[in-house]
Image: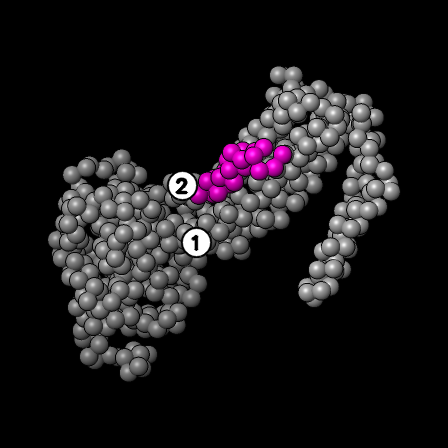
């Protein structure tokens, strides 16, 4: 049985919007406009992507998949870049990282026959990997910048003792990676206990047996776990060096960083 | 040991002076005069925009940078210890060059007058004064020729500051170090320094012996500074 929600049923979703609207009005939160706009925008976006996906799923896999993956990676690159746009070559490095990680994960899925090379399987699964990698890279960039700022004195102390930039940054790299990985580890620990993951829920609603749904969920959860870890590591290890100049001196402002590496 | 020729960097303008081996130089002057900037030029945590600095008669940039920094130790106002134990901190510098030997641990703590059972203490458990002593020991572990001190006692209370001063005095004598210290405390300058460099608005306004330059200042900038 295919799950079906009629347009009439969908209309009653408006109740879920009325609640936050009423709250905003009653408590004068001033977010009513925002609630309405977000709901409208989200709905239009989802329907649009629904139609686009229907179109893509009908395309031959060898055109539809590369096209959609490229689009997703480009959008993800621009989004993650916002977190570190003052760093040189950050866009290019993010793009390269996302391509390598996505191709690596996709390669493993296909080699070990976990999914088939069909747009309806590759695109949603890859979307989850790329989206999570994008968030991980953005967070790692942001965290790394903060760590450099907070540990300025320690970095100077370390350099003054004769450390190479890589040795001086060891603590920062360690902390950035730790911060990126811990939520991921925690999420994996409680998976299925607190809430059923979205993909699994979707498959069960779609009529797939819970055990089969779990198998898919495991594939995606572990793929995300691995790609998020790799993304954070990749971006941190590629970018820390831009906080130093060729004379192993610490660059302390965005202007110093961009002028030193231009 | 050091020779500055027409050096410009940030606020610093046309800096010229020479420092001989075993000089005990006090850099002082109003805030924003460029004292810390000048200190950072000496171990190349920063480079001049213009001019030349010589170290042991060679342009400073001809010395391999990590070796130069090893020879020119720096202690900052905040101890900036690395997370971990006292041991982890004091072996940091020599370990970078594969030169650490375990027996050094106790010796270094002795130099800074800390008991040897402090070696395994977590640095988070130490008081401000103890942290600054560990920071000194960490710098000394590299066996530097020059010791740069950027207001090393300004964050400490009077009594602890005096104790650190005593440690510094002994270390400089015992290890035959050349010292350059930034301080706002003129009494401390009298106790520790033999030569003063008074910086004002990025220039060396007066260069002389301590305590003579405090008792009989020549430049109007120094006279005004001492009056304040």
Look at the image and tell me in which quarter the C terminus of chain B lies: bottom left
Q: Residue at x 61, y 21 (%)?
A: A108
Q: Of residues B50 and A179, which is closer to you in this image?
A: A179
Q: x%, y% of residue B42? A: 32, 55
Which span is picked out in magenta? A175-196
Q: Chain of mark 1?
A: A
Within the magenta stretch, is there residue A186?
A: yes
Position of A14 with respect to B20 (left or right) is right
- Label 2 CA crowd tier, 10 Å (few <14, some 14–19, many 20+): few
The residue tagged 2 is A170
Position of A30 with respect to A181 (left or right) is right
> What element does badge 1 sit on?
helix
The residue tagged 1 is A150
**What is the number of the mark on residue B106?**
none
Position of A244 with respect to B55 (left or right) is right
Q: x%, y% of residue A107? A: 63, 22
Q: Residue at x 75, y 22 (%)?
A: A118
Q: Is residue A15 visible?
A: yes
Q: Of residues A35 and A169, which is closer to you in this image?
A: A35
Label count reads 2
Q: To which quarter of the image does residue B23 belong?
A: bottom left
Q: Residue at x 56, y 34 (%)?
A: A193
Q: x%, y% of residue B187? A: 20, 72
């Amino acid at each position: 049985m295919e799950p079906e929600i009629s347009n009439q049923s969908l209309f009653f979703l408006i109740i879920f919007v009325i609640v936050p609207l009423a709250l905003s009005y009653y408590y004068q939160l001033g977010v009513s406009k925002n609630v309405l706009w977000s709901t409208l925008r989200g709905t239009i976006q989802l329907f649009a992507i629904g139609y686009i996906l229907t179109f893509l799923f009908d395309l031959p896999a060898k055109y539809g998949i590369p096209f959609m993956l490229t689009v997703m990676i480009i959008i993800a690159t621009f989004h993650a870049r916002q977190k570190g746009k003052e760093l040189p070559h950050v866009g290019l490095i993010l793009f390269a990282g996302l391509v390598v990680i996505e191709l690596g994960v996709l390669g493993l899925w296909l080699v070990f026959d976990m999914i088939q090379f069909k747009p309806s399987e590759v695109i949603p699964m890859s979307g989850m990997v790329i989206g999570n990698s994008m968030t991980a890279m953005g967070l790692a960039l942001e965290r790394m910048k903060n760590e450099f700022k907070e540990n300025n004195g320690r970095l100077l102390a370390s350099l003054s003792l004769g450390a190479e930039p890589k040795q001086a940054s060891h603590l920062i790299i360690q902390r950035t990676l730790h911060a990126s990985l811990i939520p991921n580890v925690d999420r994996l620990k409680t998976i299925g206990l607190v809430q059923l993951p979205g993909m699994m829920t979707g498959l069960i609603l779609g009529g797939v047996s819970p055990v089969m749904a779990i198998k898919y969920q495991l594939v995606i959860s572990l793929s995300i776990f691995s790609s998020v870890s790799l993304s954070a590591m990749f971006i941190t290890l590629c970018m820390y060096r831009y906080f130093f100049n060729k004379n192993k001196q610490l660059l302390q402002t965005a202007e110093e960083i961009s002028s030193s590496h231009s | 040991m050091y020779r500055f020729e027409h050096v410009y960097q940030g606020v610093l303008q046309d800096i010229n002076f020479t420092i001989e081996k075993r000089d005990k130089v006090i850099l002082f002057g109003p805030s924003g005069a460029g004292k810390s900037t000048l200190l950072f030029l000496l171990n190349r945590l920063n480079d001049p925009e213009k001019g030349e600095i010589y170290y042991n008669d060679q342009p400073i940039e001809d010395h391999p940078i990590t070796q130069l920094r090893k020879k020119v130790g720096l202690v900052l106002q905040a101890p900036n210890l690395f997370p971990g134990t006292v041991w982890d901190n004091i072996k940091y510098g020599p370990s970078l060059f594969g030169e650490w030997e375990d027996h050094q641990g106790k010796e270094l703590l002795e130099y800074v007058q800390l008991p040897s059972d402090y070696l395994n203490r977590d640095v988070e458990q130490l008081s401000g004064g103890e942290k600054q002593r560990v920071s000194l020991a960490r710098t000394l572990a590299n066996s530097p020729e020059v010791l740069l001190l950027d207001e090393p006692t300004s964050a400490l209370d009077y009594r602890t500051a005096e104790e650190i001063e005593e440690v510094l005095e002994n270390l400089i004598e015992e290890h035959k170090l050349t010292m350059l210290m930034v301080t706002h405390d003129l009494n401390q300058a009298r106790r520790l320094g033999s030569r003063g460099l008074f910086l004002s608005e990025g220039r060396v306004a007066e260069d002389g012996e301590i305590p003579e330059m405090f008792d009989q200042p020549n430049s109007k900038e120094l006279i005004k500074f001492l009056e304040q």
